[in-house]
Image (cartoon, rainbow, N blue to C red):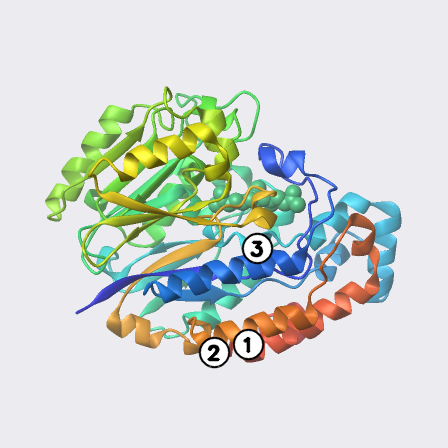
């Protein structure tokens, strides 16, 4: 049976703004308070989805969330009508209003961890929504994420959904941004690679000194248990705490893998040799031939990687077996990174082509091509069981661009977030979106 890696990209929501909310994420911190362009952001994301669809890849779309999150503000003690809740938050606690307006659900690599059916004990595709509990503005995403994923992958014969892990730092879980799967074919058993930043219960593992390590070992282990993965099909590795302190807040900022290949920076991990050997031997047991491409710090520094997002690229398999790398334009702007990419693609290795995309609106908040997509490996039968409304097609692309043009503002600054009109605009837009994507009622304003 045929199998595919389907990329579901997060559609940027109408409140996309630069709130400076993510300590440890260099771009989010340095672009704080700049005015944003939500319309441009959404169109940039849609252009990437369209381009991948036209190149013959399976592409889907994941809906944004309801923002401002009035219910979240109510839980923090703001009361009255929806407009009063927003007005009071703006007057008394602007940072909380900003957090409740973040369009951060666009970075769907953090929405969930996904294990394909070939890896799981019950032969279903398993999803665990990420609790994202390191940052308040992201910790409020998972209830709606679960509803949206449930509406996209509704068939219980093929899909199993798990609620987010307990919402405490000890089980900090950032989803697929710290998870990679290696395999020979997408439909065959593979090796799931979980990268954690620290251990919550075992102080033998070093932790970063400056910035938070968002993912814990214990969270990764819990997800592997929930999904029914075999020990032989799992490898855990620790991120180098020094790179977290240089702004590598997720592993997908310093490494990316696909099929049998891991593309990573020399400084990405601790105990790298041991980790590579384990990946090699476990993949060999399921018939795979693990290969790694290490980018030396002499060619690209960690700082270059953080600024250019070289590793936050999408590594995609082409029908002839070669691979394509989808990178943000910031890679082209960085001389060393661009020179490295030229030499990589001309060296006769597996990675033959690089395609550059303008994702500046998202990049300025620390979200590159890989952050914007959730990978779901599916066989033909499972793909046919996905809600067809969320699979990208030329007509859907047309409807979504028209929808963005109709509903989105082209400029948003902090003061605009206090405008109660923005809430109404967003709800009107999202109500229409659930019809376009055939999701049913998934947003709090639709179900409460
Ligand atoms: O969690 N930025 C996101 C970026 C997530 C990128 N995802 C992956 N690497 N997979 C984060 O730090 C910034 C929001 C703001 O500052 O307005 C933000 O949430």
Q: Nearer the viewer, mark 3 or mark 2?
A: 2
Nearest the eye: 291 or 182:
291
Return the residue at label 2. 395
Do the CB atoms of the residues marked 2 and 1 lie less than 8 Å apart?
yes
Label ID, residue 105: 3
Please tell me which of labels 1 and 3 falls first in the chain. 3
Nearest the eye: 5 or 80:
5
Under circle 3, the secondary element is helix
Q: Is mark 2 within 8 Å of ligand 1?
A: no
Give neighbour class at mark 2: few <14, some 14-19, many 20+ (Cα, 10 Å). few
Under circle 2, the secondary element is helix
Question: Where ligand 1 lies, by image quadrant?
Answer: top right
Return the residue at label 1. 399
Q: Position of residue 403 (x, y in %)?
A: 62, 73
Q: Residue at x 17, y 36 (%)?
A: 280
Quadrant location, the N terminus: bottom left
Under circle 1, the secondary element is helix
């Amino acid at each position: 049976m045929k199998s595919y890696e389907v990329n579901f990209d997060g559609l940027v929501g109408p409140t996309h703004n630069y709130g400076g909310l993510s300590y440890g994420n260099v771009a989010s911190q340095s672009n704080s308070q700049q005015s944003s362009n939500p319309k441009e952001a959404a169109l940039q994301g849609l252009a990437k989805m369209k381009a991948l669809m036209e190149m013959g890849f399976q592409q889907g779309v994941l809906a944004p969330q309801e923002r401002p999150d009035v219910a979240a503000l109510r839980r923090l003690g703001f009361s009255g009508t929806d407009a009063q809740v927003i007005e009071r938050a703006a007057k008394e606690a602007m940072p909380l209003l900003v957090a409740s307006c973040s369009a951060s659900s666009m970075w769907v690599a953090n929405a969930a961890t996904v294990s394909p059916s070939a890896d799981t004990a019950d032969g279903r595709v398993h999803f665990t929504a990420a609790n994202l509990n390191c940052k308040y503005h992201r910790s409020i995403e998972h209830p709606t994420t679960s509803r949206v994923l449930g509406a996209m992958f509704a068939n219980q014969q093929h899909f199993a959904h798990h609620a987010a892990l307990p919402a405490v730092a000890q089980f900090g879980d950032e989803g697929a941004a710290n998870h990679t799967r290696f395999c020979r074919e997408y439909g065959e058993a593979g090796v799931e690679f979980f990268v954690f930043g620290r251990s919550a219960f075992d102080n033998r593992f070093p932790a970063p000194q400056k910035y938070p390590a968002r993912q814990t070992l214990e969270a990764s282990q819990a997800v592997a248990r929930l999904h029914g993965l075999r020990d032989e099909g799992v490898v855990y590795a620790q991120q180098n705490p020094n790179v977290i302190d240089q702004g590598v807040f997720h592993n997908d900022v310093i490494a990316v893998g696909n099929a049998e290949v891991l593309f990573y920076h020399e400084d990405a991990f601790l105990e790298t040799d041991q980790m590579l050997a384990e990946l090699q031997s476990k993949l060999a047991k399921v018939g795979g031939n693990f290969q790694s491409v290490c980018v030396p710090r002499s060619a690209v520094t960690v700082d270059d990687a953080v600024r250019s997002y070289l590793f936050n690229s999408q590594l995609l398999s082409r029908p002839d077996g070669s691979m394509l790398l989808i990178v943000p334009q910031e890679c082209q702007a960085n001389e060393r990174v661009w020179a490295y990419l030229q030499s990589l693609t001309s060296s006769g290795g597996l990675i033959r082509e690089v395609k550059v995309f303008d994702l500046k609106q998202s990049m300025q908040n620390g979200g590159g091509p890989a952050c914007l997509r959730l990978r779901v490996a599916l066989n033909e039968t499972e793909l046919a069981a996905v809600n067809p409304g969320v699979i990208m097609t030329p007509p859907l692309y047309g409807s979504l661009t028209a929808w963005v043009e109709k509903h989105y503002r082209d400029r948003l600054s902090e003061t605009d977030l206090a405008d109660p009109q923005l809430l109404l605009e967003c709800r009107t837009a999202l109500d229409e979106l659930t019809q376009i994507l055939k999701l049913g009622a998934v947003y709090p304003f639709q179900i409460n």
